[in-house]
Amino acid sequence: MINLRINFLTKSNNERKHLYIRTRIKRIIYPLVFAFLLPISLNGQSSWIYGVHSFGDQTPGYLVRLNYLNGQYDTLMYLGYQFIESAGSTIDPYNGRFFLYGSLENTDGNLHIIDLNLLQISSHTIKYGADDIEYIFLNNSLLYRADDALWSFNLNNYSESFIADVEHETGTYSGFNRYYNPIYNAYIYMGGKLTMLDAFSGELINEVSVNPIGSMVIDYRSGNQYNNLGQSVYQHDPFTGQIVELFSGLPGYYSWLVEQHSVYDQKMNKYILPYYNTDGECMLAILDMNDLLLDTVYEQPSCYMTLHQIYCKPQSYLSLIEDTLYVSKGLNYIWNLNGQPLLSNEQQWFVPNLYGDYHTQVNYPDYSSISDTINFLYNQSKTISKSYLISVFPNPFTTATTFSYTLQQPSTVHISIFNHHGNQVAEIQREQSSGKQQVIWNAEQLPSGVYFYRMQTGEQVASGKMLINR
């Protein structure tokens, strides 16, 4: 027998009630035809959302996937009786590894790694009570908090280590309240405050009070950080705590679907939002973050798919941290300097010792990808390129945005703005002292579209993308 949740609106108090009964045909029989699965191709598409189909804790669970572009729903494998923590899932979006924290029938350990390409499970043991688990793809590890401490699980040798003591205040939030921002190499989570920790050292980067926010996601390429609460989508700045509403108005919205998580397709820039409508149906909305317009909204084939994570196969991500280049975890790597192959090895990091443009080709289980290029100035024994963090907020914006950053010493700050044709449309220059600084750019005379900035202070350069949306 199986449980079904029916939702209805009580007019007297406008509260949603939940009744559990023992039958449902439309949303239950269809997704659970696991015993008669046809052969399924697991490769080739980047639009699959993976999750666990179950009817609650200590009930049978199934690994399922949903093609959010066309609504195709597949049951892939039986997981057995399960108890997975609500914040106990994360994914390796490059290699297709689905991580679950909790218990699975007939397995040892509390951390379960599902290879989505081979449909194989391996289990390991990590700290009891792990919370807000997140995959860090620049060093192939998992970060999580337990016992007021930050812990790391190294996926190269499957070892656990203490990183740093952290404080966690109980706050108001819902959904996925943490994410990894590779631009700052920061593990960011929401408790009593929005807290940024260095993902390698655990060092506190920033902590700020914010209004309650919902599920949080990050666009790797732009560094924009989004969240949704109710029927609205917001952009938030983890440095200042500012929140700007970007979109509101999910059709027929009634309440958030607590059992499911919003996800972000890094390759297609789509924000996928689950919710209940006023008829009690489980809906899925696809929001295009390039123009902030809804692509489509449709009823989901199942309300019982939880722990949403998306295997989206993004472009390889290259970053300079201290004096070392790190690239997103793959099977193997070809490092290039000024367009010429430099080194092919099994290491996902490289210490440069020559001036020039570096990029990396990474081979993953199901695809290959070339990273963006990073330019380096090499000076005697260390690389000069990154000594401050820059935030552009809001982004997208209508008329003006603010560049926020920290200078290590008094500097001349030079910011150049280019349109999508590569033509310079604005230039800002400031003499500024050391410490936290800001520059406001007013773009009310420019048309809507994509723009790029290049910020230089002495030998250091940062660049990124912005969107004017009116």
Image: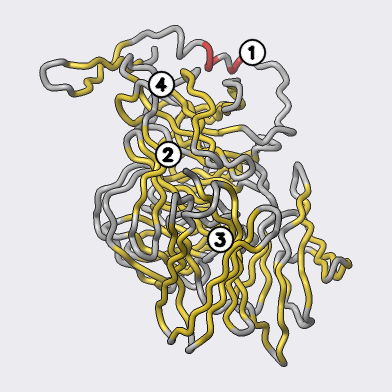
Q: Residues within 10 Å of mark 2 (few under 14, many from 20)?
A: many
| Disc 4 target residue | 282
Q: Nearer the viewer, residue 221 or 446?
A: 446
- Taking the spot 30% from the left edge, 56% from the top edge, the residue there is 191
- Whichever of labels 2 and 1 marks the residue nearer the N terminus, that label is 1
Q: Residue furthest bottom?
A: 380
| Disc 3 target residue | 182
Q: Residues within 10 Å of mark 4 (few under 14, many from 20)?
A: many
| Disc 1 target residue | 36
Q: Nearer the viewer, residue 89 or 245?
A: 245
Label 4's element? strand
Q: Quadrant of the N terminus?
A: top left
- Whichever of labels 4 and 2 marks the residue nearer the N terminus, that label is 2
Label 2's element? strand
| Quadrant position of residue 365 | top right
Q: Nearer the viewer, residue 76 or 203?
A: 203
> What residue type is disc 1 on?
Phe
Q: Position of residue 76 (x, y in %)?
A: 61, 26
> What residue type is disc 4 on?
Cys
Q: Residue furthest left?
A: 12
Are the residues flagged by discs 4 and 3 in contact, CB closer than 8 Å? no
Label 3 or label 2, whichever lies nearer to me, is 3
Instruction: Please indicate, yes or no, whether residue 27 appears anywhere in the rendered image.
Output: yes
Q: Nearer the viewer, residue 388 or 191?
A: 388
Instruction: Work out how far the residue at label 2 is from the one at label 1, CA to CA, in angstroms.
Output: 26 Å
Instruction: Work out how far the residue at label 3 is from the one at label 1, CA to CA, in angstroms.
Output: 41 Å
Rendered view: 180 above or below 302:
below
